[in-house]
Structures are given as C-alpha cells and as structure tokens.
C-alpha cells in the first residue's frame, strides 16, 4: 500500500466524519422526520413535538435514525475526482440529498452501478 493511498484514505475518513455533523445532513434528516405530539402525564398534548422516526424517500416507510442514511443524489464515489470536487459534492445543498432506509440505499447504489 502506497503512502499516498493511505493519506487519501485518512483525509476521506476525516471528511466523512465532518459530513456526519454537517448542517445540510441535519436539514435533510429534519425534512424526513415523522413528528408526533408528546403527551403530558394527564394525557393532554404538550407543546413539544417529538420525532417518531424518519421516512424513506423511496419506500415511504418510517424507520429509526439508526436505520436510515442520508444519500447524495449525485454520486460522490467516482474515480478521477479531485479534493475540490469531493468537497463540493459532499457538502452540497440539502435538496441534493435524500433520506433512505438501508435496504433502499443498497438498491439505489446497485442501480447506479449499472
């Protein structure tokens, strides 16, 4: 394994870690959130709305946060990219992202390879 390859892998891992905290990712998750009303002890609705799950953009089912992923509509996994291209595609606007359940995410990536 070359030194350059290891270095690129470390930088990409760092970018992915930053991506997990990005505002664009949070906005996409917020838009896919299925909200419910929290009830007080006496059974009356509280002003606080809770997140019950996240709706998959493909199958429209509701899942927990651990069961979904934020998918880039424009594939960020391409050969021959450069660092500027990667940063531009990773940190795109929230309208270029969609929340998918893990099963639909696998299907979408399988179709992209064709």
Image (spheres, rainbow, N blue to C red):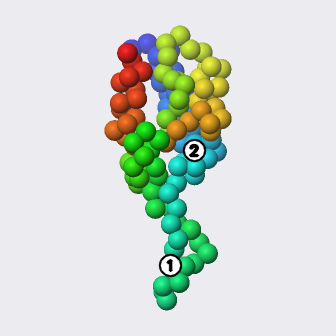
Q: Position of residue 12 (x, y in %)?
A: 52, 27
Which residue is rendered at x = 58% and y = 49% of the image? 31
> Which of the image's four quarters has the N terminus?
top left
Crowding at mark 1 (Cα within 10 Å: few <14, some 14-19, many 20+): some
Residue lying farthest top? 80
Q: Is residue 64 above or below residue 14?
A: below
Q: Position of residue 3 (x, y in %)?
A: 47, 15
Q: Of 81 and 113, which appears nearest the observer?
A: 113
Of marks 1 and 2, which one's residue comes earlier in the chain?
2
> Which of the image's four quarters has the C terminus?
top left
Q: Position of residue 78 (x, y in %)?
A: 49, 16
On the image, which quarter does residue 108 sit in? Answer: top left
Q: Of 13 and 29, which appears nearest the observer?
A: 29
Which residue is rendered at x = 60% and y = 15% of the image? 82
Relative horizontal placement of residue 107, taking residue 4 as reference (left or right): left
Residue 28 - label? 2
CA distance for labels 1 and 2: 26 Å
Badge 2 element: helix
Work out whether residue 21 can be spotted: no
Work out whether residue 105 can be spotted: yes
Which residue is rendered at x = 57% and y = 52% of the image? 30
Q: Is residue 23 above or below residue 13?
A: below
Residue 39 - label? 1
Badge 1 element: strand
Q: Position of residue 99 (x, y in %)?
A: 49, 42
Which residue is rendered at x = 45% and y = 57% of the image? 53
Total of numbered circles in the picture? 2
Relative horizontal placement of residue 46, taking residue 2 as reference (left or right): right
């Amino acid at each position: 394994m070359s030194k350059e390859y290891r270095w690129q892998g470390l930088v990409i891992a760092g970018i992915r870690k930053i991506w997990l905290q990005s505002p664009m990712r949070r906005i996409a998750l917020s838009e896919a959130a299925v909200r419910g009303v929290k009830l007080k002890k006496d059974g009356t609705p509280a002003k606080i709305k809770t997140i019950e799950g996240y709706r998959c953009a493909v199958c429209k089912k509701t899942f927990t946060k651990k069961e979904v992923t934020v998918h880039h509509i424009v594939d960020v996994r391409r050969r021959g990219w450069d660092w500027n291209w990667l940063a531009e595609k990773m940190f795109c606007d929230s309208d270029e992202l969609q929340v998918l359940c893990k099963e639909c995410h696998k299907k979408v990536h399988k179709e992209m390879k064709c």
